[in-house]
Amino acid sequence: MRKYFGYCRSATREQGQKTDSIDRQEKAILGYARDNNLDVAKIFKEYGSGIDADRPSLIELIAKIKCGECNGIICTSVDRLTRDQLTLAQLMKLIEEKDIEIVTPDRTYTKTAEDQLALSVMASFAEYYAKSLAEKVKRAKLQAGKQDR
């Protein structure tokens, strides 16, 4: 049986606790694995921005993949793994070199050209969303500061 690691992420602890995001992701991963007869060896969980590549659980997950400890990653969405193109490139290289797959409830991404393209497009939109949201928040804070004067 192929072995998988699960990965759950929420942007902030407050957001994750308020919405039970991490718990819901974990339940979805385990349910998907059970329904598809996949063995989940470990679930990595963390709080942090998807733009940030220096997340401890993600770094550990990538290191374990490099050592050949799993056949794939299960997550609820690609944007849970990363919203950063450089991190995605690293994951895509691992898909190719280690013959792993990234599994979501909607799609399994492998080393085929079609899957690599789809993964790139998904990550591009995720990165755009994160950066666009950060810009909107920054503008709103500046506007609020001007109104306080």
Image (cartoon, rainbow, N blue to C red):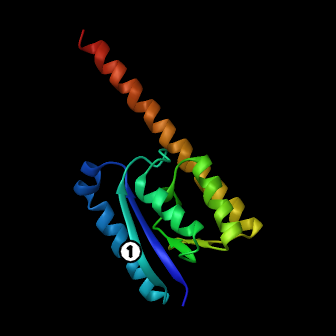
Kind of element beneath mark 1: helix
Residue 18 position in % (x across, y down): 23, 54
Residue farthest toward the top in the current orientation of the protein: 149
Residue 121 in sight here: no
The residue type indicated by label 1 comes to Ala
Residue 35 in sight here: yes
In the displayed structure, 113 sits above or below 82; it is below
Residue 91 position in % (x across, y down): 61, 60
Measuring 39% from the left and 79% from the top, which residue is drawn there? 30
**Count of marks overlaid on the render:** 1
Quadrant of the snapshot with the N terminus: bottom right
Measuring 41% from the left and 54% from the top, which residue is drawn there? 56
Residue 4 position in % (x across, y down): 50, 78
In the displayed structure, 137 sits above or below 50; it is above
Measuring 58% from the left and 74% from the top, which residue is drawn there? 68
Q: Which residue is mark 1?
A: 28
Left-right relation of 104 to 139 = right
Quadrant of the snapshot with the C terminus: top left
Residue farthest toward the front in the current orientation of the protein: 67
